[in-house]
Amino acid sequence: MAISRRTLLGLAAGVPVSAALAGCGSSGPGSGTGATYWYLNGQPQEGVRAGAVDAFNKANSKTQIKDTTFQNDAYKTKIKTAIGAGKAPTIIWGWGGGTLRTYVEAGQVEDLTSWFDQHSDVKKRLFPSSFGAATVDGKIYAMPCETVQPIILFYNRRVFEKIGAEPPKSWDDIMSLVPKFLAKDIAPFSLGGQSRWTNMMWLEFLFDRIGGAELFQSIIEGEKNAWSQPDAIKALTKVQDLVRAHGFVKGFSSITADSNADQALLYTDKAAMMLHGAWSYGIQKNDGKKFVPSGALGYMTFPPVEGGKGDPSDTVGNPAQYLSISSKASAEQKKVAKDYFATGVLQDEEVKKWIDNGSVPIRLGTEKLLASSESADFLKFTYDIASKAKVFAQSWDQALSPTAAETLLDNIVKLFQLSVSPKQFADNLNAVTGK
């Protein structure tokens, strides 16, 4: 693909927000005859998203979609600023949940409930579970899209063979593996800690495995003092136990997930394990050369914690990704967006590309395609997690309100840097989430 507008603005992720918005020019809600669309860059996912837009544009020569891409962390800031300034793109890519609720309460996105009623065929072809994070107070405000993304514990089989160990079956196993890998100058766990949400995944699983789904849900629902429940303090303490044991790669606080440096540590044998989203498989397959084809990449669900109340089949992550329509867009732009939802999202070619990248699309009826893929084992593993989990909880930074999520992420950094105690962490979070 030639370097285009979508690529250039993706490279400009470090530009100040005001400058980036000004640079978008025709990306404002009321200009042009087509729709505008912002989404995340980074391969292989960007190629699939761009391909879906290109296919729609080729089939609709008079109603084009102009797309712009951003890095993950930069996008989260820029999209909120653009929406608040009334300069949102027509189509808003996101994760649903608490952030979507804030857009709805401010009247910034379209109610799509009646549209889905009129296009029941569109709704029926998608995973039913994908609509939970798209729904606010019983109404649908986003189109579920792309893939299901549970959080997975990846591991490097080569380095496990090097120390003569097996993958962990419990939290005690995790802690006992740490000194064995350190003795061989291998980081037990890779972590892109500068991105903050990567650290959060550890807390989410420990809260679930120790306190069960009830503890997790009490936090989502903002119950008073939910963060300081005994099981929550126990989970916070275990994270710091792992930090103190040097379980994470040295300098993890300066490693970014956007750069994929954390993933490189795994496939270059510098780290033994990594907790990450299912999308990581595609990145490692794309960037790791022979690492995935050779069978060196292992994967498993997060193990149980001794004495914990959680069901080991439960998972956390992203039930899907989501597309909303800006309420500030023109009638013509809204029509283009809805046409894209109906005829451009998760069509056959896009579905095939997601599967080829090692992802499970949220479109129903793909079992045969999944089984015939060269990544069939991983795809079945992911599909089974998503379909068999009694609870598939949405990641906290998306399920909570943006204000609470920001406080959470800031305090997670401090927790991992050992600059706050579990009790201080809990008190800080209770202050912004408790009813």
Image (cartoon, helix red, strand yellow):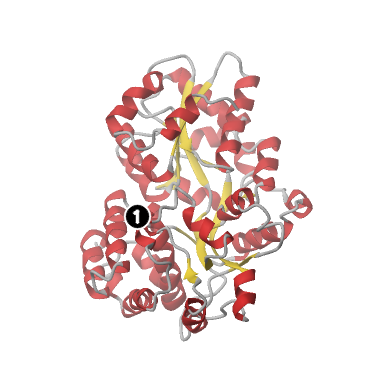
Q: Secondary structure at mark 1?
A: loop
Nearest the viewer among 225 and 147 is 147
Is 422 situated above or below 409?
below
Could you tell me residue 61's position as x and y percent? 61, 15
Give the residue type at disc 1.
Leu
Q: Is residue 405 left or right of residue 365?
A: left
Is 197 situated above or below 125?
below
The quadrant where residue 102 appears: top left
Q: Quadrant of the C terminus?
A: bottom left
Could you tell me residue 232's position as x and y percent? 34, 75
Q: Is residue 194 left or right of residue 190?
A: left
The outermost residue toward the bottom is 307
Question: Residue sitting at 75 percent across and 48 percent down?
Answer: 369
Could you tell me residue 162's position as x and y percent? 62, 76
Question: Residue sitting at 24 percent across and 65 percent down?
Answer: 430
The quadrant where residue 387 appears: bottom right
Nearest the viewer among 365 and 306 is 306
What residue is disc 1 on? Answer: 400
Which class describes the residues within 10 Å of circle 1: few (<14), some (14-19), or many (20+)? many
Nearest the viewer among 395 and 378 is 378
Q: Please say whether residue 43 is visible from this viewpoint.
A: yes
Q: Is residue 70 left or right of residue 353?
A: left
Q: Quadrant of the N terminus?
A: top right
Q: Please say whether residue 85 is visible from this viewpoint.
A: no
Could you tell me residue 299's position as x and y percent? 61, 66
Is 20 situated above or below 44?
above
